[in-house]
Amino acid sequence: MSRPCLHLVSYSLLAASFCLAQTQSATVRGEVTDTSGAIIPRAALILTNVDQNQPRKTTSNDNGEYVFLQIPPGRYSLAVEAPGFKKFARDVFTVEVAQILGLDIQLEVGSLSETVKVTGEAPLLETTSSALGEVVNSLTTESLPLNGRNVLQLVALTPGISGSPSYRNATDSNGPTSVNGFSANGGRSASNSIMVDGSPQEVMGYNQPAYVPNPDSIQEFKVQTNNL
């Protein structure tokens, strides 16, 4: 059973209505071309979760573009085939929570009985999205000390995050009400959104976390500080 993924989003008030549209799932997309840069339509692609042995299949469109949507975070491999070209095999790479991963494929002319295998490349960068944020993996959540085992304390590892609430806390008739205790780039903590596996986890009215997972159960989490 996979462990839950936590996604924390900090928006301005104008963007708060978009919080529910965020998800913990990732996207892998790109373009299939030959060595001259010409597009290759109708190439067959198989994206496989290597830990679950779960394949996903798609085909490049007439523009040579492909996309895998709603991908759970994890380790994957990619295989690509097209008539008249050698098989392409991309060794294991990591897809992080809420990541939009651009992965362009270049096929070499040859027989399908031949395979071009790509291994040992530098970590893949997210070049298809302008969202700002930081991913904290399970090794960090399990290794760093936490007061009360509250994993939300680790959001302060993200650039631009203050571990203190915003300049103005929510209040009710009983006085100040605690909110999610961090502020991103000077924004109000009342604009923060917390999601576990894509499910919103805030107490309505006060924007308190309704549920904070045990740090031992978290696969990874992402702190996203804008929605551009």
Image: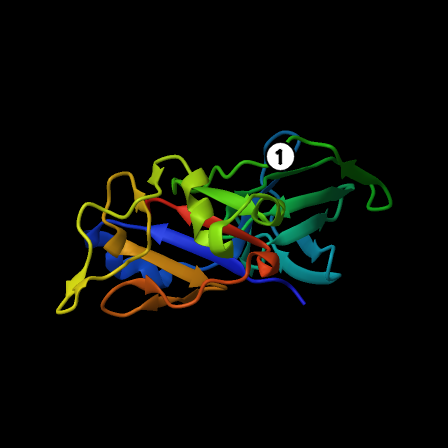
Name which quarter of the figure residue 204 lies in. bottom left
Name which quarter of the figure residue 35 lies in. top right
Q: Is 48 located above or below residue 106 in the figure?
A: below
Horizontal relation, residue 80 to residue 225: left or right: right
Instruction: Report the amino acid beneath label 1.
Output: Pro
Q: In which quadrant of the rendered image does the N terminus lie? A: bottom right
Q: Is 90 located above or below residue 202 in the figure?
A: above
Residue receiving disc 1: 123
Horizontal relation, residue 109 to residue 58: left or right: right
For the point 66% across and 60% down, the residue is: 57
Q: Nearer the viewer, residue 214 or 188?
A: 214
Horizontal relation, residue 209 to residue 83: left or right: left
Q: Nearer the viewer, residue 94 or 173?
A: 173
For the point 34% across and 58% down, the residue is: 193
For the point 16% across and 62% down, the residue is: 171
* Residue 176 horizontal/vertical position (percent): 19, 60
Report helix, strand or loop for mark 1.
Answer: loop
* Residue 58 horizontal/vertical position (percent): 62, 59
Q: Dot 1, crowdedness within 10 Å: few (<14), some or many (≥20)?
A: few
Q: Which residue is farthest left? A: 173
Horizontal relation, residue 118 to residue 194: left or right: right
Q: Nearer the viewer, residue 88 or 69?
A: 69
